[in-house]
Image (spheres, rainbow, N blue to C red):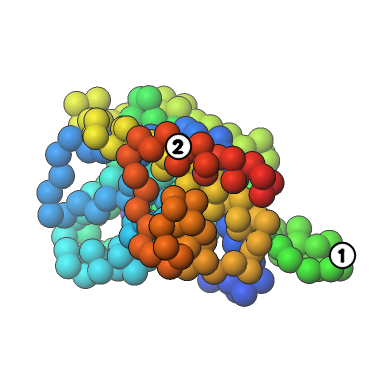
């Protein structure tokens, strides 16, 4: 499939949405230690949440992807993808960048491509997915603030986002928009084989192309806890800034407010504190 045949996702007004929330199930299903066994200088890795990660210097941002594409030029590229999703606006911006890339785009879903990450995956000329990997699509999740009139209009506000995604999945899969909308309504997880059968991927990825970073595997529990904490903060206090959320995590860790935050591997006490704080916010 030529990228030119893929639909552009039109820009939306980002001021009407306070924040995008990742599903806990997608976070739990994401293994940040999964990566490609081998990469080269025409490979772009997207092995994190989509958008800024408030608890590290990571996150898959449109700014970083734009810089990578400029550096690679018009060559064919490979995108290695393993993400629980994140910011819808960042996701569609990255999708459009890949869609417009002059060279051929091969997307390799190494672990999971959920929510906004599944939108990015659709930009591939070829979409290869691990047999044990997953593609998850659902209706947009977001945070809204306002009075009862504002909240009643929230569904109308989100509808264009869902429509855009349903049309994209339909174009990719060859199914009708009614079918892909139902997939989204049901929050559907496709394993590797199912994704290929549904037309949302073109082939299965050979297992020897994937490996697990054993060092990072030790960090997984704390990484997932920190993301869930960010979700809880966004839902409870959508006006809280990224720097304020970073400072709060610093307080949980016992560091000075405003200090640079780095999630510590295997810090069971920190992980417990994060989970307790997230639960208390909810």
Q: Residue at x 44, y 53 (%)?
A: 254
Q: Residue furthest left?
A: 40
Q: Where is residue 240? Give x, y as percent.
A: 59, 67
Work out whether mark 2 precedes mark 1 in sequence or the reverse, and give the earlier one.
1
Q: Where is residue 233? Give x, y as percent.
A: 60, 55
Image mark for residue 89: none
Q: Is residue 25 left or right of residue 223?
A: right
For mark 2, give the secondary structure: helix
Q: Where is residue 278? Give x, y as percent.
A: 60, 45
- The residue that mark 2 highlights is 269
Along the line of sight, the residue nearer the viewer: 245 or 205? 245
Q: Is residue 156 left or right of residue 100?
A: right
Task: Count neighbours of disc 1 (C-alpha within 10 A) and say few if under 14, some if 14 to 19, many if 20 or more.
Answer: few
Q: Is residue 204 above or below residue 118?
A: above
Q: CA distance from mark 2 to mark 1?
A: 40 Å
Q: Is residue 222 left or right of residue 277?
A: left
Along the line of sight, the residue nearer the viewer: 264 or 198? 264
Q: Residue at x 59, y 62 (%)?
A: 19
- The residue that mark 1 highlights is 148
């Amino acid at each position: 499939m030529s990228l030119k045949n893929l639909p552009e996702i039109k820009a939306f007004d980002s001021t009407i949405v306070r924040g995008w929330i990742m599903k806990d199930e997608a976070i739990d299903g994401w293994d940040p230690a999964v990566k490609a066994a081998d990469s080269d200088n025409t490979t772009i890795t997207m092995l994190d949440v989509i958008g800024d990660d408030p608890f590290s210097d990571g996150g898959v941002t449109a700014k970083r992807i734009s810089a990578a594409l400029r550096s690679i030029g018009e060559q064919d590229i490979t995108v290695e993808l393993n993400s629980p999703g994140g910011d819808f606006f960042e996701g569609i911006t990255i999708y459009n960048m890949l869609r417009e890339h002059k060279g051929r785009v091969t997307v390799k879903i190494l672990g999971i491509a959920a929510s906004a990450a599944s939108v990015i995956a659709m930009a591939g000329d070829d979409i290869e997915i691990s047999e044990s990997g997953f593609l998850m699509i659902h209706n947009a999740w977001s945070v809204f603030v306002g009075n009862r009139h504002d909240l009643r209009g929230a569904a109308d506000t989100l509808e264009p986002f869902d429509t855009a995604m349903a049309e994209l999945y339909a174009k990719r899969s060859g199914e009708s928009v009614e079918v892909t909308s139902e997939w989204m309504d049901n929050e559907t997880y496709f394993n590797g084989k199912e994704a290929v059968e549904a037309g949302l991927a073109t082939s299965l990825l050979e297992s020897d192309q994937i490996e697990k970073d054993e060092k990072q595997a030790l960090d997984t529990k704390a990484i997932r806890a920190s993301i869930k904490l960010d979700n809880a903060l966004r839902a409870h206090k959508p006006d809280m800034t990224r720097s304020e959320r970073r400072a709060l995590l610093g307080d949980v860790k016992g560091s000075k407010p405003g200090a640079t935050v780095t999630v510590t591997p295997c810090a069971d006490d920190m992980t417990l504190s994060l989970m307790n704080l997230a639960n208390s916010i909810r």
